[in-house]
Image: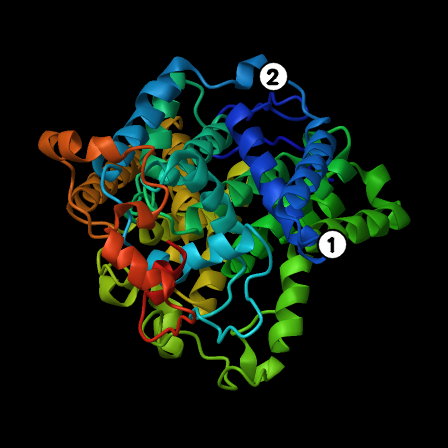
Amino acid sequence: MESNVQRPMFNVKNRTFDIGRRTVDKIGNAFLLVYFLVLARQYLWWFTNRNSVAWAASAMVAIVVGYLYFSSQEVSESNKPAFSFWLIAVLPLILIYVMRVIYPDTSFDVLNYRLFHAERSLVGFLYLPGDFFPTPAPYNPAPDMVTGLFRHALGYRLGTIANLLAMIWVARITEKLLRPLLQNAWLRAAAVLLAVMAEHLLFEINNYMADLLALPLLLEATYLALHHCEFKNRRRNLLCIALLLGMAVAFKLTNAAVALPVVLLCAYRELTACSASYVQKSKQIGVAALLSAVAFVLPLVPFSVYLYRETGSVVFPVFNGVFKSPYWPPNNVWDPRWGPKGLWEKLVWPILITFRPDRLSELSVYSGKISLGFVVALIGFLLVRRDRYLREIFFLVVAATVLWTVSTGYIRYAFYIEVMAAIAVIGLATTLMNGRQTLGKIVSAVLWLGLSVQACLAGYYVSQTEWGTRPIASARAYRREARYLFHDRSLRSFLDADTLARLDEVDVWIVSSNKTTGIQVA
């Protein structure tokens, strides 16, 4: 039977884990409560038309679910972030957010359907009787409901702070994942910054696009999976992992490609790496698997049922070659503009993306973190035999990258890989640096240098563009635009009386072009 902590390669000291059962994270816990709230509200779509009653009931459900989820947490003082974390890792994220937040987000997807999804879903079903599917596709509006709550509370500009908080949560989990690899708090904080310095993550830090909101769920599930055997109540830990992954897939269906390796890791850890006495109890394992499946499905149920009743497909419009909804062409082809074409490109796509960023996203820039991390993880998985923690990180990176490649190959669906790829590079670089071999130390220095160059390149891209094509705000722009902060909750307040009168006379909106729905609900 393999031990929980083994002697790693290159004479590195054994990994030590001082995590208690859980680590209290106020930002993460507060955000999880918001996530529980919006998912509970989706269940309430069917039970009442009174919005205030639905939200009150949703709040009570969220509190109960939050209590059940958080009740197993134990504070581990040694696992709290140090001052260096906030200074080195978090402060740059705040500064990047501040660079453009003064300008309102006019990203294409936001005006095209994100605002519509949020406003409709906050008060009830996504579509009203007589609607002609006024968005490109009815994606699950759960993340849009989250950003919608912040937008209603803080106004249009500052409502994007939801994505900043999600990135701070991501940094916090990354810091926990790096603890077994780096003991020095200052060096670990710098490593966290290198891990989160990925341009496509930071392109979304101050807009209403939804990809970032699921990332901390995936990373927290990964953290729990990597430490599964250290938990006293492993069944409860499996339920938490399943719930987190289910929420991540509910927020973005494409997250299933990177969630599957975490599920496989959990199964492996439970069946082979944990205590033999538990492995022998097949009935208990079966019960745990069944309960975990229920926990995974619960966040997906309300919108999937609604979508099936409206369209005849639980994942409309994708895989319509299987579900054959009459409202979409019967094919399974994803957007042909992006991703690998043909078998050869699929085999080399993790490397090719650095040289063909025009096939990776609409912004056509890429600094290469996944390429570096994939190569390192693949080599590390083959060579590193005695460090269980690091090998499992390598497995997650390789498996998630392969599944992402064959599913879409589109960069906004690979944020999890961006962060985990950096952790893999840092893990191997640290292991080699702590070894005795001179060649290993040289390779370690090259890896640190490569990750640093990538982070600098990402910073340059962030200074040049983002999804809303907003410039970096100057001091003059801040003086001009600051008066709108907290006062930009409705587009109507910016319209003159004649325009308002004309709009009020409109009885029916017809979606005649892209972004029409953004005007409808603004």
Q: To which residue does mark 2 refer?
A: 76
Q: Earlier in the sequence, mark 2 or mark 1?
A: 1
Task: Say if 175 sits above or below 505 in the image.
Answer: above
- The one of 493 and 142 positioned closer to us in this rendering: 493
* Residue 164 is at least partly visible in this image: no
Separation of marks 2 and 1 at Cα, in angstroms: 41 Å
Quadrant of residue 111 in the image? bottom left
- The one of 275 and 167 positioned closer to us in this rendering: 167
* Image point (56%, 42%), residue name: 222
- The one of 513 and 26 positioned closer to us in this rendering: 513
Q: Secondary structure at mark 2?
A: loop
Q: To which residue does mark 1 refer?
A: 47
**Would you say the residues marked 2 and 1 are in contact, meaning their CB atoms lie under 8 Å apart?**
no
| Residue type at the position of mark 2 | Ser
Crowd around label 2: few <14 · some 14–19 · many ≥20 (10 Å): some
- The one of 176 and 472 positioned closer to us in this rendering: 472
Quadrant of residue 53 in the image? top right
